[in-house]
Amino acid sequence: MSSRLAKEYKNVAKTLRADQSFSHVLSLGPCSDDNLTHWDAQIMGPADTCYSGYKFTLRIQVTDRYPLEPPKIRFAPFSIPHCNIDFDSGRICLTLLEQEHWSPAWDLLHCVQAIWLLLANPEPDSPLDVDLACLLRAKDYSAHDALVCYYLNGGSHGSRSN
Amino acid sequence: MVYSAKMLNDLSGDEDSVELEFESDSEFNDDEYGEGSDTSDELLYKNDKKKTDYLDSINQKESLDRKPLENGYENDGVPRLTYNCLTTDQIYDLVLLRLDRIQPIFDCPYGDIIVMLQKYGWSEERLLEDWTEFEDKVLISCGLKVAKQIGCSRGLQNHPDFLCHICCESNKRKSFRLECGHEYCLECYQHYIKDKLLEGKVITCMGCSLALKNCDIDAIAGENSSQVLMRSSIKGFIQKHSNHYKWCPFVDCNCVIQVNNISTLSEFPRFHLSPYVVCKNHHRFCFKCGLESHAPGDCQVAEVWVKMAQMESANLNWVLKNTKECPKCGVNIEKNGGCNHMTCQSCDYEFCWICELCWKGHGGGYYECTRFKKDENNGAPETKNSLRKYTFYYKLFSEHENSAKLDWALGLAVEQKVKALQENIGLSWIETQFLPESIRALIEGRTTLKWSFPVAFYSDPSHNLTKIFVDNQALLVGAVESLSQLLQVKEPQDIINRKLEFFNKAKFVESRNKALSECGRDLLCKGICIARTT
């Protein structure tokens, strides 16, 4: 387990430096060097979405059974309004992160990438935030984006971590 | 015993009765029997003039499916279920038998077809439909074909020094890979598979969607591992098709009942009957609500009663279940056998466990203690009185529930006795069957008795029929207690000498059981017993 995480740590640093297609991942690494089970990540909101220009923090916790078990990943609480993310807790609804659909071949960078893609491709059919999902389902994108903006700019205790 | 032999016969002999095209079979039945189909065979087919071609085959099927009737009273113009009792392994074995037939259509190895069936929820029909149209797509979606051939062979590999990408450890000697080229060490694969076996879904390569076949799973995780996966998968199938299949609700029983003509299920409530099925271990339960046999009550009575019991008396249950003080000397007595005739070990006082009165009063075969006596003191508020009434019946219900459990344990002891009889006295197996049969009669009698108390509780006490019902109840109590007492006899020779007594008492319990059940059904049909949530 630890050798896997150590290797991922090394690879991630290399990939982020070399691969331009990961430029939206500002950082990904363990919180401290002597404990590889808690990681933090910072990602930029995808361009051409209402999240563009905002930074988001992900908190990653890896269990003893990793990589057989998926990592537990959340956004910082009260930081991101999204129909598949619980605003108060930062919990993410993403099938990839469920035991049933997880594969040990994926690594933490895959997960962060998948979450980043989720920001641009919301799934209103399995929502955690029902209000935003309803707006998306009604195809009222301007209302959706306006509500997201309101939250991102500090409405309802939002964007505390920005 | 005749029963299980019959079931075996069904399994092996008549392939149509244990259809594997589960879904299509049910549709077929539904169509044939029509909506709200009537009950007797003549009526069943009277309207089906168009389908006379099918008539013969169905008739034949019906007769092959037909189970021996327990008491016959399910026969007089009321619906009847035809069903099979299976285990998950048997269901899987039947799948394998079917494979022989459908393999030529697919022209693939057996392992591939199993993966496809698993993916298609064991629905042969859906799979074949897709297969005939887009064979290649099915193969790819089931993970049986790689999109791009790269010339890797499937199987276990040996290396001097292998670096696994999952655990990132080198020096691995054994690994496994599929045609996709994704290769991981054996330990990682073993951990991965172990987690997935109980999910029952197709297990894929960790790096892509290529499927692991049963032989691969056995090669990686050890023999019989795929069997575990198949069992989980079949379990998932049963769960999904719970209108056709139900697990036996009894503890540690792994039987599955498959009902062939589910359209008749809707017919039962009209008659205030319940669709009882009996599994191979002689557990009788209701296919509709999944509870144990709750005759003479119907599902409504059982449901309301159980709900009430959960609400009002979760702990009452415990208080009543455990010990009682001897009414005479006050010593604590634990009931460890099924009989309600108690003899205090310290003062030799004989009393009835239920009413705690002297046993002598019970002598004439008449059991006063199952009658609820209205409180003479009418000054008590209404609610208190109704709670008292409920407590009274609940107490009886739980007494008999407890006794039934003890009888079940007694039944296991009887098995030992039967063995002893066969070995010591040299009796043949058939000659000792009166013992398990009496136990069965006893348990069924007690279950009926138990569920008769809710019926009594919800019945209008002033009605004459209710009084008759209570009389019937008392008679069954007498019959059950007397049989229960007889079953306490331990001496083998004594048992043999009293064989006739066993036989008579068991038959008496059975006939009283039937009478009480019918009487209870009468109460329900005539609207005298109405289960309501308060």
Image: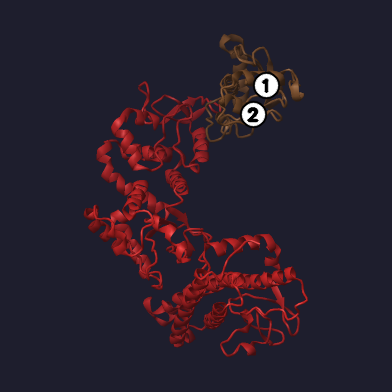
Q: Residue at x 34, y 42 (%)?
A: B124
Q: Horizontally, is B534 left or right of B474 in the view? A: right
Q: Chain of mark 2?
A: A
Quadrant in which residue B132 is drawn: top left
Q: Which residue is mark 1?
A: A147
Q: Chain of mark 1?
A: A
Q: Position of residue B293 (x, y in %)?
A: 50, 66
Q: What colour has chain B?
A: red
Q: What colour has chain A?
A: brown
Residues at marks 1 and 2 touching, judged by CB atoms closer than 8 Å: yes
Measure the alpha-carbon separation of dots 1 and 2. 10 Å
Let me know if marks 1 and 2 both belong to one chain.
yes
SS for dot 1: helix
Q: Which residue is mark 2?
A: A131
Q: Position of residue B391 (x, y in %)?
A: 68, 70
Q: Position of residue B221 (x, y in %)?
A: 46, 40
Amino acid on which the number 2 mark rests in the picture? Asp
Q: Residue at x 39, y 55 (%)?
A: B263
State the scheme by which the image is colored.
by chain
Judge the density around disc 1: few (<14), some (14-19), many (≥20) Cα neighbours within 10 Å.
some
Mark 2 or mark 1, which is nearer the start of the sequence? 2
Looking at the rendered image, the quarter that the N terminus of chain B falls into is: bottom left
Quadrant in which residue B329 is drawn: bottom right
Amino acid on which the number 1 mark rests in the picture? Leu
Toward the viewer: A45 or A3? A45
